[in-house]
Amino acid sequence: MKLNKNIVLKFEVGDTVFTKINPNISLIVKRYIDGIYYCGFQNDPDRWELGLSARALVGS
């Protein structure tokens, strides 16, 4: 994967984030691919990952 050096990421891998529609559930950023942040559930790592855009997420 070739990463454009001009892109400034809003969140880094390992950051704790929350969704705007449900800020009670904490997520961990697992990876960033093509404008999508793939996040796992902090309290339940066996659940599926969510693919979310930066505007759907809020940092801690």
Image: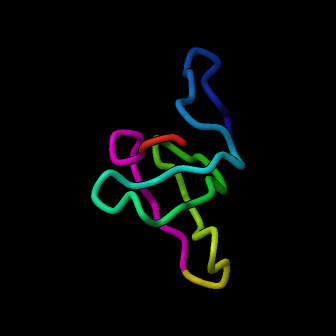
Residue 56: percent from left, percent from top: 34, 48
Q: Residue furthest right?
A: 14
Q: Is residue 29 left or right of residue 18?
A: right
Residue 5: percent from left, percent from top: 64, 18
Residue lying at 62% horizontally and 53% vertically, measured from the top left: 29
Residue 26: percent from left, percent from top: 53, 61
Which colour scheme appears in the figure? rainbow
Residue lying at 60% horizontally and 24% vertically, measured from the top left: 4
Q: Residue furthest left?
A: 21
Image: magenta residue range: 48-57
Q: Is residue 20 left or right of residue 57?
A: left
Q: Nearer the viewer, residue 58 or 50?
A: 58
Residue 39: percent from left, percent from top: 56, 60
Q: Is residue 11 above or below residue 25?
A: above
Q: Residue furthest front?
A: 24
Q: Nearer the viewer, residue 36 or 41?
A: 41
Q: Is residue 13 left or right of residue 20?
A: right
**Is residue 11 found inside the magenta-colored segment of the image?**
no
Total numbered labels: 0
Residue lying at 47% horizontally and 66% vertically, measured from the top left: 25
Q: Is residue 6 above or below residue 35?
A: above
